[in-house]
Image (cartoon, grey):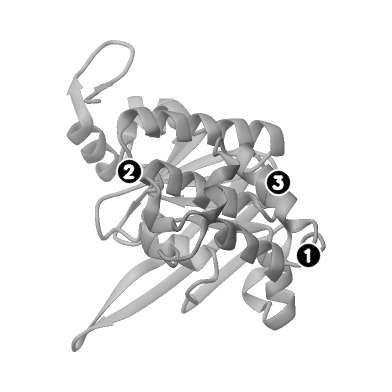
Amino acid sequence: MKSPLLSATGLQKTFRRGENRFAALAGVDLEIAAGETLALVGPSGSGKSTLARVLMRLIEPDAGALRFAGENLLALTGSRLRAIRSRFQMVFQDPLAAFNPRATVERVLYDPLRIHRIAGRGERPQRIGALLERVGLADTLRGRRIHEISGGQRQRVAIARAIATGPELVVLDEAVSALDVSVRAEIMALLACLQREQNIAYLFISHDLALVRDTAHRVAVIDQGRIVETGEAKRLIAAPASAMGKALVAAAMKLPRRNGPEFLP
């Protein structure tokens, strides 16, 4: 593996639920190289979304180390943190919840350009048009409100917003799970194209092992807040070593075959 773009060591995060405390992350070690897709899979409640939010500095870990492009990410605050945030972005499962639904498409795309001071004010409308074109959306959509466009269009807007700052890493938290099969295929093709052209690394959080097998370079299996197995995607899914990896593959398999598992569509 190449020198990691992002590396996490011993990440811990505990939450309180009533009188009880539970460990959402219990010592996570993880590396992502520039330009690779690392899939993160695990059962509900295993810590996938918590890990994503810790990696994005949306929530703070209780312990551990986190480095991005060689910098100690957990030591950055204020203007230094804002400056580096343009280099990593996140796409959520439901952009309608992530965005103000009454905001226009243009406003959603304008904000990261303004916040990170990308291009002059007069140039930003042109930048927005280029972003819309890049993700396959008509320029005429820029005046539409988020709640007025389709789910597939909203997810394309979310991707356009994520790439507006020229990031090196994008975290995709179940970003295609709510889309129908044809739209999902289009979005995945778009993500692959962006990766080839811009060398973007993806952390791809998904429960769809068939999609993971076909799109990820490597897979990390998380269970009860710990990474229990990592490996090359096709090889791991064909022959998982951990108990949780075996359970996930068994749940997804339609019937076994010689050259690997066959999954339900």
Residue 28 position in % (x across, y down): 45, 61
Residue 75 position in % (x across, y down): 67, 78
| Quadrant assignment, res 255 | top left
Q: Which of 246 and 113 is in front in this view?
A: 113
What is the spatial separation of the Cα atoms under label 2 and label 3, in whole angstroms?
A: 31 Å
* Badge 1 element: loop
- Look at mark 2 in the image and give the residue it sits on: 177
Choose mark 1 or mark 3, whichever is in front.
1
| Quadrant assignment, res 19 | bottom left
Q: Does the CB distance between marks 2 and 3 fall below 8 Å?
A: no
Q: Which residue is drawn at 32% across and 79% down?
A: 15
Mark 1 Cα-neighbour bin, 10 Å: few <14, some 14–19, many ≥20: few
Which amino acid does the dot numbered 1 rest on?
Arg
The answer to whether residue 167 is above or below residue 39 is: below
- What is the number of the mark on residue 121? 1
- Look at mark 3 in the image and give the residue it sits on: 3
Which amino acid does the dot numbered 3 rest on?
Ser
Residue 233 position in % (x across, y down): 44, 31
The answer to whether residue 176 is above or below residue 181 is: below
Mark 3 Cα-neighbour bin, 10 Å: few <14, some 14–19, many ≥20: few
Residue 221 position in % (x across, y down): 37, 46
